[in-house]
C-alpha cells in the first residue's frame, strides 16, 4: 500500500504562506519605521517565521492525512458497537490528554505561573483545564448518544458562569475566560471534533451536521467554569489575594 503522505501538500504550503504574509509585512513596516532592530535580531525573527511556516504546514498536512481520517474512523467504530456508551469515558480521557498537547494551553499556563509568581501554578492550571475539557468531551458524547439539544448544556452552563463571576476574584475571572479560548486549540478541533462527527454519523436518528458539531462550544465553556470554581476554592481557603494586590 502506497502512503500518499504528500498529497495536497503544495496547497497546504500555499495556504500557510498566504496566512503568514500579512504578519511578515507588518513586521517589515514596523522594523523600517519604528523598531529598527539590529541585523542579528532580525535574522532570528526571520528564522522564527521560517520555522513557524514549516511547523504549520507539516501540522496541517498531518491533520489531513492522519488526524481527520483516524479520528472519524474511531468514532464510527465505537458508535457501531453495542457498548457505544464507552465513547463517554473515552471522550473524557481523550479530552483530558489532548489538553496536555495544546500549545496555547502550555503558553498561557506558563504566563499565569510567571505573572502570579507561582500563586496559580502551571501544573494546577493544566490539570484544571484538562479536567474541564475532559468533562466537555464526555458531555458532548452523552449529547450525541441521547440526542439532547445543545441549548440544554450551553444556557445553564453560561448562566452558572455568570453567577460564579459575581463571587470570584478579578484575577480568576480574567484567566477563566482566556482559558476557554486557548482550550479550543488544534488538538481538540482536529481530532476530537472529527471523532464526534464519526459517532454521530453512525448513531441512529442523529445528523452529523446537527449533532456532531457543537463540541467546540462546550470545550470553550467548561474551562471557564473549572477556573472560576478553582477561584472559589482558593477564596474559601483564604488563599486569594485582595483586588489591590492582584497581578
Image (cartoon, rainbow, N blue to C red):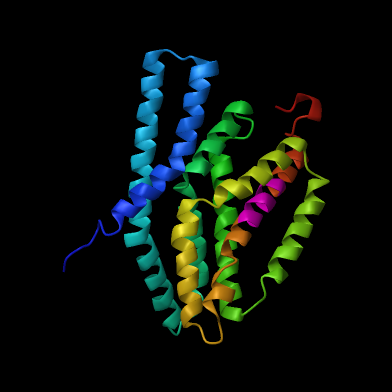
Q: Residue at x 64, y 30 (%)?
A: 119
Furthest toward the left, the residue is: 1
Q: Residue at x 48, y 14 (%)?
A: 36
224 within the magenta span: yes
Q: Is residue 205 above or below residue 216?
A: below
Q: Is residue 88 above or below residue 131?
A: below
Q: From the viewer's perspective, is 83 left or right of 235?
A: left
Whole-percent x and y of residue 87?
48, 72
Whole-percent x and y of residue 231?
71, 42
Observer-nearest of 3 and 97: 3
Observer-nearest of 238 and 8: 8
Observer-nearest of 216 and 56: 56
Q: From the viewer's perspective, is 11 left or right of 216?
A: left
15 within the magenta span: no
Instruction: Answer with the quarter of the image where residue 67 lies.
Output: bottom left
For the record, the magenta segment spans 220-228
Q: Residue at x 74, y 28 (%)?
A: 246
Image quadrant for the N terminus? bottom left
Amino acid at each position: 500500500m502506497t502512503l500518499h503522505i504528500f498529497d495536497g501538500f503544495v496547497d497546504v504550503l500555499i495556504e500557510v504562506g498566504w496566512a503568514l504574509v500579512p504578519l511578515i509585512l507588518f513586521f517589515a513596516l514596523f522594523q523600517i519605521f519604528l523598531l529598527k532592530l539590529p541585523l542579528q535580531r532580525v535574522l532570528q525573527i526571520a528564522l522564527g517565521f521560517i520555522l513557524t511556516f514549516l511547523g504549520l504546514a507539516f501540522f496541517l498536512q498531518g491533520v489531513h492525512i492522519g488526524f481527520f481520517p483516524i479520528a472519524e474512523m474511531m468514532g464510527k467504530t465505537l458508535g457501531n458497537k453495542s457498548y457505544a456508551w464507552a465513547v463517554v469515558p473515552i471522550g473524557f480521557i481523550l479530552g483530558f490528554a489532548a489538553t496536555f498537547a495544546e500549545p496555547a494551553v502550555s503558553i498561557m499556563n506558563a504566563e499565569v505561573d510567571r505573572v502570579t509568581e507561582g500563586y496559580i501554578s502551571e501544573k494546577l492550571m493544566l490539570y484544571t483545564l484538562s479536567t474541564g475539557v475532559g468533562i466537555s468531551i464526555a458531555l458532548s458524547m452523552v449529547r450525541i448518544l441521547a440526542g439532547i439539544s445543545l441549548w440544554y448544556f450551553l444556557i445553564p452552563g453560561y448562566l452558572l458562569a455568570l453567577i460564579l463571576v459575581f463571587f470570584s476574584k478579578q484575577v480568576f475571572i480574567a484567566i477563566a475566560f482566556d482559558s476557554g479560548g486557548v482550550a479550543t486549540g488544534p488538538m481538540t478541533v482536529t481530532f476530537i471534533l472529527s471523532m464526534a462527527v464519526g459517532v454521530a454519523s453512525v448513531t441512529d436518528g442523529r445528523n452529523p451536521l446537527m449533532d456532531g458539531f457543537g463540541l467546540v462550544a462546550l470545550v470553550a465553556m467548561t474551562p471557564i467554569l473549572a477556573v472560576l470554581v478553582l477561584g472559589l476554592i482558593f477564596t474559601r481557603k483564604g488563599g486569594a489575594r485582595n483586588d489591590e494586590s492582584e497581578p
